[in-house]
Structures are given as structure tokens and as C-alpha cells.
Amino acid sequence: MNDRLLDAARKIVPTVSANAARTERELRPTPESVAAVRDAGLFALSVPREAGGLDTDLRTFVEVIAELGRGCASTAWVVGLSASAKRLIGSIVSNTARDALLVDPNAVVCASGVPRAPAVSACPAAFGSLGGERWRLAPNWPPGPWSWCR
């Protein structure tokens, strides 16, 4: 386990806790909570070291997410999903797409799987990849540059 990462999570619990009610009302983490997680480097939990990430082991990952959950379960959920999406997407896309996805180790990534979708691709959210849709699995998301979409 990495005590430094757990300490970083502990330090931002007051911020995410102070924003928990607003996060629930708005159905997404507040900009303040996202900034605190990003500043702590915790959006890079699953990014490989060679890409500037933390490449944490499973135990550290779970303990950091649990610690964040003490302050705001929803924010912890988003951090965990973003990390999981980066690990999964990074393992199934081309090297070029993976390199583009991981250019910012602290980028927020959202993903939603549709088992019957004919094809999926990584799309920059800045270019309107969500098409104005409000996904039931990712409402009002993402606050970052990438989403995994069909």
C-alpha cells in the first residue's frame, strides 16, 4: 500500500465532504471536488508510470477510493470509474489512441458500455461526442476531455 496516496486522499476528504450535498443535487462532483482530486493526482491512479501516472496496486486503489468515500461516496465512485475506464480503455485501443488518452494522467474519463453496440471509439468530449444525449449511466458527465462512447 502507498501511504503517500492514502494521505493525499485524507487531505482532500474535507473538501469533497463540504461539497457532497451539492454533488448529490447536481448529479456530478462539483468543480471544487474535481479540482481537489486532480490537484492531489488521484485521477492518475491507474495510469502507467511510463505515461506519468501512479500505476497503483489494487489494495492502494481500493483504500484510496474508500478514503474518498468517507467524504463523498459519489466523488469516490467517479474517481474509481475514471481509473477503471482508463485501465480498460488503455488495454483495448490502439497504441496511438492510448497515448492520446493518457497524455494527461489526471484527465477525467467516463465510460458507458452498451453490450449490443456495433462499435465503440474514444472520442474527445470537447468535440461534442456525447451528441447532447444525457446518458443514464453517466448523467451530466464528463467534466474532462474524454468520454468512451459508441
Image (tube, grey):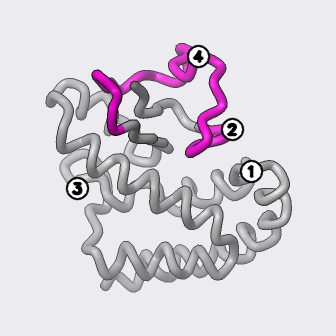
Q: Is residue 62 magenta?
A: no
First in residue order: circle 2 vs circle 3: 3
**Residue type marked 2:** Asn
Q: Is residue 22 left or right of residue 136?
A: right
Is the residue under label 2 in contact with that under label 4 (CB below 8 Å)?
no
First in residue order: circle 3 vs circle 4: 3
What residue range appears in magenta?
115-141
Q: How far, Cα to Cα, is label 1 from label 3?
A: 32 Å
Q: Quadrant of the C terminus?
A: top left
**Residue type marked 1:** Leu
Q: How far, Cα to Cα, is label 4 from label 2?
A: 12 Å
Tell me where residue 68 sits by quadrant.
bottom right
Please identify the dominant SS of the magenta region. Answer: loop
The x and y percentages for residue 121 are 32, 24
- Of all residues, the one furthest to the front in this rendering is 116
**Residue type marked 3:** Arg
Helix, strand or loop under label 3: helix
Q: Relative to residue 92, is residue 31 depicted above or below?
A: below
Tell me where residue 113 sits by quadrant.
top left
**Residue type marked 4:** Gly
First in residue order: circle 1 vs circle 2: 1
Residue at image mark 1? 27
Residue at image mark 4? 131
Looking at the image, which is closer to me, 133 or 25? 133
Q: Which mark is residue 140?
A: 2
Is the residue under label 2 in contact with that under label 1 (CB below 8 Å)?
yes
